[in-house]
Image (cartoon, helix red, strand yellow):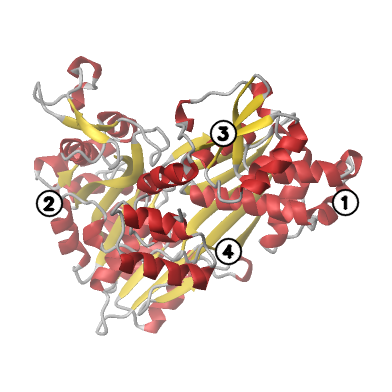
Amino acid sequence: MEIGALLLKQGMVSSAEVKEATEEQQRTGERLDRVLVRLGHVDSSTMLQAISEQFSMPIVDLTAITPEPELLKVLPSRLVFRQQCVPIDQSDGTLRVATSDPFELTAFDELRLLTGLSIELVLANEEDLRDFIRQHYGVAGDTLEALHAESDPLEVQAESSDTDQAELASVIRLVNDLLIEAIRERATDLHIEPYENRLAIRYRIDGILTTAAVPRTVDRFRAAIISRLKIMANMNVAERRRPQDGRISMRHEGRVFDLRVSVIPMMHGEGVVLRILDSSKGLRPLGELGMQENVLERWDECIHTPHGILLVTGPTGSGKSTTLYASLRRVVSSEVKAITIEDPVEYHIEGINQIQTQAEVGMTFAAGLRSILRHDPDIVMVGEIRDRETAEAAVQASLTGHLVFSTLHTNTAAGAMPRLLDMGVEPFLVASSVEAVLAQRLVRRVCNSCGEDWTPDWNTLPEALRFREGTVLRRGEGCRDCRGTGYHGRVGLYELLVVSDGVRKRVLERRATSEIAEAAEAEKNLTTLLDAGRTAVLQGLTGPDEVARVAVSSQ
């Protein structure tokens, strides 16, 4: 019985839904089962049960199977990747093979001929199958196998052939596979790190570095991979002595991604880091960033002040740019002119004039800021204050009636003032210009799919995160959506310091960061990262371990 008719007979779908899916299938050429799932007429588990009934095949849970290494070698990786099937058991001349696509049964005849064994097909969830293949065969294992077949090992190592190797169809596919896998895994960064005897490829997912499942043989093609990335990013392929930066724009499944590429020479070759930005995602409004209510209210007041400096601080990758963009969008209107100078321009915002720094022609942050002021802006955003020249230009802009947004790299909000003083800005200028500092971190969010109530052993928690005995928190058990980590996505923690008279007095006296924080706290003008972390834990957004990782250590 055809799958649509079977589901209809079981009352899982309506005639109208089957008709809609059939029309869509004729238009796209997809399988009907996948169309029905994509349209939301039936969920994937129900569909798997229906396919199992249609083909009289048992369903296996691949997440509970750990195959023997020798068993995995029974099928060549090219077939595993091409037909999306994996061997899971062998006995008495029969090989059990798991697949999510039993519709073309004749395609599995090749397996019988190749192995000389009887083939018993079983069904598996499509996502579980892909994860199984990635885990045991590696990303792009079939592409690497093809490369081995078409490449001379000596030629691959030859520097003169790097560019030629980079243009091979298999190398192009290999690099594309690595990039697509990073996108599928929700990675924000892709790291390619050369060591003496191996090439490490790692993804940063939800702020944590994770080693990518790639075959060790990828090391043979390190030069070709890096050359290919250089070509894509419009870099000088022959230059291996100096760092280079570039950009790649790519489209995947209807989404546009902007990849910022950095290449730097290392002891055993060139290291590459790619920052992955999803340009298709709209910028989130300020109210949706996860700020606690009291911080959002006070920050909203700060960004509506007519002049002064507003700073956002935190380490690289903590979401500072996102907060600045959201703040700008909150205050910019047809009656307000805003100009930004950035390195690089990460997101294009309608109604805001954005400038890219170009150090090679003298367009630095400081030089750009001085020129910007001649264009009559109301609001100015400087991507980062890195040196005394930029800091002093920002101060002068604020003192001449402009509202200036910028970022600094400091651990706490209170640390921003001593940082400006260390750059050489006079204390009275810092005290009179800085209006507020927002420090932030990103913590992993408890997975919505597997999150459950949890009462921890309070003695195991840091003292700062011990709540009243018996308080119920949330944690993720670990599932497919969160890759078994219990966390999926991230949420911000925000520390806000509003500059008050007590803070200004201590800045003028060049007091330490701790004394500035004490003064702000005494005047109720400081909400700390720890306060934000405790609130997020109690709301079930994150776990105590996450807050301890990013907030407790920063106090």
Q: Real-space Cα distance between discs 4 and 1?
A: 26 Å
Marks 4 and 2, the one that precedes in the sequence: 4
Q: Nearer the viewer, mark 4 or mark 2?
A: 4
Horizontal side, residue 283 vs residue 308: left or right: right
Drawn side of residue 51 relative to residue 246, left or right: left
Q: Look at mark 4 in the image and give the residue it sits on.
A: 250
Q: Secondary structure at mark 1?
A: helix
| Label pair 4/2, CB-CB below 8 angstroms | no
Instruction: Return the residue at label 3.
Output: 135
Q: Kindly report the distance in space between the C-alpha atoms of the residues bearing marks 1 and 3.
A: 31 Å
Q: CA distance from mark 1 to mark 2?
A: 60 Å
What type is the residue that disc 3 sits on? Gln
Asked whether the viewer can see residue 140, the reply is: no
What is the spatial separation of the Cα atoms under label 2 and label 3, in whole angstroms? 45 Å
Question: On residue 294, which mark appears?
Answer: 2
Residue 31 in the image, given as x and y percentages of width and height? 51, 59
- Discs 3/4, front: 3
Residue 60 in view (yes/no): yes
Above or below 215: residue 372:
below
Label at residue 161: 1
**Quarter of image, res 450:** top left
